[in-house]
Image (tube, rainbow, N blue to C red):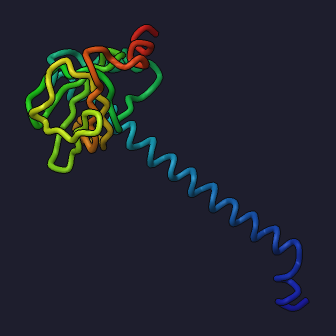
Amino acid sequence: MNIEEIVQSKIFTGILSGIAITIVALLIFQAGIMVGHRKAAYSYHFGETYYRTFGRSGDAVRDAFPGELAGGHGAVGRIIKLEPPTIVVEGPDNIEKIITIGDQTIIKRFRDTITVNDLKLEDHIIVIGEPYDTGTINARLIRVMPGDMPPPFLIKLKEQ
């Protein structure tokens, strides 16, 4: 057999396909490891800094997330502390998240862009951002919910 016959054989094609599928599977697995590591690092640092921030035991964080890690890319809830550039949001699960507001943060109320000075205590907000290693969230977008009432999905989450 010459090289050309070997390359065109079904066995060679099958082996090559198997190698390609294995490489794709390993790349997907590696992406999952990276995402999981980032989420675990955020939860670890959040729990580690919880006591310094709120004066309570980090055990409250572990108790609030039984069997799961805290999501670090956003927050939903009401503002309970407002000291720009930092705000603290209490979510429907009674967990407080520290949000940092930077120069690039966009804050919206309806269609209007507002500033951090327009935010008030008790405002209900939705935050989308990026987790810091310190356990805080760097806000990219903050959406202020209208009125004094929390959005309906917050009420349902709190009841569960």
Towards the viewer: 137 or 67: 137
**Residue 139: % across, % down:** 25, 40
Which residue is situated farthest in the right direction here? Answer: 1
Q: Position of residue 15 (x, y in %)?
A: 78, 68
Q: Residue at x 16, y 29 (%)?
A: 87
Q: Nearer the viewer, residue 114 or 74?
A: 114
Q: Residue at x 82, y 75 (%)?
A: 12
**Residue 94 percent coordinates (x, y):** 31, 15
Residue placed furthest toward the front: 111
Quarter of the view holding residue 80: top left
What residue is at 76 percent from the left and 67 percent from the top? 17
* Residue 70, quarter of the rendered image: top left
Residue 159 appears in the figure: yes
Tell whether 25 sits left or right of 34: right
- Percent position of residue 85, x then y: 11, 37
Quadrant housing the N terminus? bottom right
- Answer whether residue 133 is visible to the viewer in this image: no
| 45 over 58 or under it: above or below | below
55 vs 34, left or right, is: left
Q: How many marks?
A: 0
Residue 86, above or below 62? below
Relative to residue 42, is residue 98 drawn left or right?
A: left
Q: Is residue 84 left or right of residue 150?
A: left
- Please give the name of the residue rendered at 20% of the width and 29% of the height, measured from the top-left corner: 49
- Res 35 quadrant in image: top left
